[in-house]
Amino acid sequence: MELIFIRHGQGEHTLDIPVSLQLNDPSLTQKGVEQARLLRSDLPLSKEDIIIISPIRRTLETALIWSENVPCRKIITPLVSPRMFPILPNATTLPCDKILDINLIKSEYPNVEIDMTSPVELWSEGINTMPESGFIEITKKFISRCREFNKEKIYIVSHDGTINSYRQLISGQTLTRNDFLHDAGWFKISC
């Protein structure tokens, strides 16, 4: 099985760092919208594909723009929500990385599935500051769930730190922040 991790397009929270990291629920910028549209030619989708999406507005916008007019399956899960990389002791989740409320997701994104099999606490706490031991368990569950789809490839729209965290655990390589994907960048890995 091949996992294809896609970083969301440029978000409003990256325009004036560190101040913009304090934004609540930032959207894509116009450049981010264009980057999401370009994914259509870089990674064309079919109705047979599955996209797993982080429950954050910028990832949802990226996935929905990219998959516009393609009736593929779209699943939102906190298993690919923002994750700090590397993990810092006593760190807290920034406002720009707070998970959207399930009821808001249901209201604003009625055509996507919500993964209700994920632990309830992840819908409020996410995986952002989860200790590495807990994240290793999440990774095993996530990969097992992906295998259950019985697909050759699965697309995952997520965040730079989350993608690096999964890549590092799956590949066994040591990664740094220099390995972060650029906006709307993507990386394939077999598992």
Image (spheres, rainbow, N blue to C red):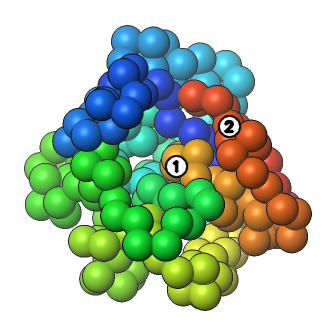
On the image, numbered disc 1 is attached to which residue? 158
The residue at the point 19 percent across, 63 percent down is 102
Residue at the far front in the pictured view = 90
What's under tag 2, amino acid-wise? Answer: Leu
Asked if 180 appears above or below 105 in the picture, the reply is above
Quadrant of res 69: top left
Earlier along the polypeptide chain: callout 1 or callout 2? 1
- The residue under the point 39% across, 80% down is 118
What's the residue at 37%, 69% (across, down)?
126
Where residue 93 sits in the image (x, y, percent)? 34, 59
Q: Is residue 119 left or right of residue 138?
A: left
Q: Does the image show residue 50?
A: no
Q: Which mark is nearer the camera, 1 or 2? A: 2
Q: Circle 2 sits on which residue?
A: 181
Q: How many marks?
A: 2
Q: Secondary structure at mark 2?
A: loop
The quadrant of the picture occupied by the N terminus is: bottom right
Q: Residue 136 versus residue 75: which sits nearer the camera? A: 136
| Secondary element at tag 1 | strand
Query: Is residue 129 positioned above or below 44 on the image?
Result: below
- The front one of 110 and 61 is 61
Instruction: Decide: few, some or many residues near mark 2? Use Cα within 10 Å; few <14, some 14-19, many ≥20.
Output: some
User: Residue 129 sits in which quadrant?
Assistant: bottom left
Q: Residue at x 25, y 49 (%)?
A: 95
Vertical side of 15 occupied by 21: above or below: below
- Quick check: can you spot residue 22? yes
Hey, what amino acid is under mark 1?
Answer: Ser
User: Is residue 86 rendered to the left or right of residue 98?
Assistant: right
